[in-house]
Amino acid sequence: MSHTNLLPTLLSPISPLIILCILFFSLVPKKSLGAVNPYFQICSVPKTCGDGQAIRFPFYIQDKQNSSCGYPGFNLSCDNNGHPTIVISNNNYTIHQIFYQTETLRVSDSAFSNSNSNCIPSINNISLPGVRFDLAPNQTNLCLFYNCNSSAHESWPPSEFYPSCYGENDTVLALSRQDPKLISNVSMECKSSVLAPVAAYGGAISIGESLRNGFVLKWKATNCSICEDSGGYCGFDNTMYHFQCFCPDRPHVWNCTNTTTPLGYLPGQFFSLEISFFFFW
């Protein structure tokens, strides 16, 4: 029986090329062939309630956006007028403007959205959870007094009273907390009172308009700018309960770390290929 000599075949010029191709494809990073992280795609598209405001981290719209695209406690809803709303300490507030760069938002009690422009609804004192929101500085507090007796009407000029939204003959006594005419016994002449912050008051802006324009809140959540500047989208891991930066390859702790070299090779791969080529050639 004759035996075929395989040595010339193994030493032929084509063999090193075959081995080189095998090494080349085995060293190509797997991530270059992988799919884009789904959360990167989901959170890259901001949503809106209809008023044109882009809702993105730390906020997310329930039933419209994945909760992983927002921060715990920053879930929003949409009202019938197309405005985003947020519940804070069981009170519903309409969001008029979100300022992402300064991490602030202007809100007003949603009761003003359900009333006409000529009356003041019954609202509650604002109670803020310090872990998420604080009042922004340099704002004015208005005192609203409800169900005042005849003595109050005799003590205060008619211009200080505004029609109530819940009674044809009811009125609301509205004063600035800094008003020098404000005296302590006014609370004894009215059944209830509320302290309402407003962002702007005075001059041509009336008390009613100030209340409807609302006040400014400063939110507390992980800063998103470092992640966004690196090309990622901010999110939150609700299972592990920590911030995440969603990047094209995978979630990162803080930002999208760019370790990709030209053609997707890792450091040292060109050197390995050259050694393999000369060795087998």
Image (spheres, rainbow, N blue to C red):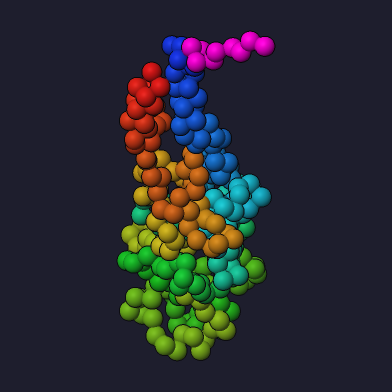
Q: How many marks?
A: 0
Along the line of sight, the residue nearer the viewer: 80 or 90? 90
Q: Is 91 in the magenta?
A: no
Residue 144 position (above or below residue 250): below
Q: Residue at x 54, y 63 (%)?
A: 241
Residue 267 position (above or below residue 202): above
Relative image position of residue 21 (x, y in whole percent) = 48, 21
**Residue 94 in sight from this viewpoint:** no
Relative image position of residue 153 (x, y in whole percent) = 50, 79
**Residue 10 in sight from this viewpoint:** yes
Relative image position of residue 154 (x, y in whole percent) = 48, 82
Along the line of sight, the residue nearer the viewer: 32 or 225? 32
Along the line of sight, the residue nearer the viewer: 190 or 67? 67
Q: Is 6 in the magenta?
A: yes
As drawn, the residue found furthest toward the front would be 1
Relative image position of residue 116 (x, y in whole percent) = 59, 56
Q: Residue at x 40, y 49 (%)?
A: 255
Q: Which residues are magenta?
A: 1-9
Rendered-image quadrant of the N terminus: top right
Residue 243 position (above or below residue 268): below
Rendered-image quadrant of the C terminus: top left
Along the line of sight, the residue nearer the viewer: 238 or 83? 238
Q: Residue at x 37, y 24 (%)?
A: 279
